[in-house]
Amino acid sequence: MMLMFQSALFSVDWWTEPLGSWMAWTRATAAFFIFIFACIAAMGIWEYKVPGGNPRRGVFALDTTRGDRLFLSLLGSAFIFIAWIFFVSTTLWWPLLICILWAVFVFRKV
């Protein structure tokens, strides 16, 4: 019985089941927005604990702060997912790995 519950928990139907009648809220969209808010909160805590997100010049010859790098990594991740869905349209674990690598690159080199 427990195995059936676990498989249903991670199924596509569970993630895409509507949570209400207003808009198209699903568990996947809720997880997405919770992740975005958690990133912004973590950035705020990081800036409070270690102030001094002074701009630095990276590979793209832009002066970026921590917040700029967070924005670039999230924006780039959105485009990676959109391109993956358009061209490949299969499981989304591979673009997630690419997005994590992109975010590491942005925070280290940009």
Image (cartoon, rainbow, N blue to C red):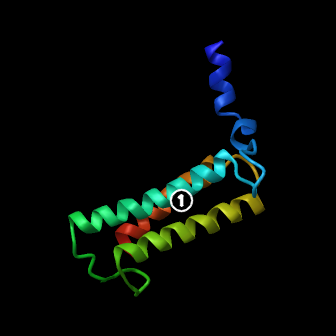
Residue 67 vs residue 98: left or right? left
Decide if residue 43 is on the left or right side of residue 50: right
Q: Nearer the viewer, residue 4 or 86?
A: 4
Mark 1 closeness class: few <14, some 14–19, many ≥20 residues within 10 Å: many
Q: Quadrant of residue 105?
A: bottom left
Q: Disc 1 marks which residue?
A: 99
Measured from the top left, where is residue 99 in percent x and y?
54, 59
- Above or below residue 7? Residue 75 is below
Q: Provide the secondary structure element on which disc 1 rests.
A: helix
Residue at horizontal 70 percent and vertical 52 percent from the top: 25
Residue 2 against residue 54 in the figure, above or below: above
| Residue 23: quadrant of the picture | bottom right
Q: Please name whichever residue, 65 or 42, is drawn nearer the observer in this view of the structure.
A: 42
Name the quadrant of the C terminus: bottom left
Q: Position of residue 22 (x, y in %)?
A: 75, 55
In this picture, residue 103 sits left or right of residue 33: left
In the image, residue 93 above or below residue 82:
above
Q: Residue furthest front?
A: 21
Count of numbered labels shown in the rendering = 1
Q: Nearer the viewer, residue 66 or 36?
A: 36
| x 65%, y 33%: residue | 10
Q: What quarter of the picture does the N terminus occupy?
A: top right
Q: Where is residue 103 shown, x and y percent of the image?
A: 46, 63
Residue shown at 73%/44% (left/top)? 16
Q: Residue at x 26, y 81 (%)?
A: 54
- Say above or below: 82 vs 3: below
Residue 64, given in percent of the width and then of the height, sits at 37, 81
The disc labelled 1 sits on which kind of residue? Cys
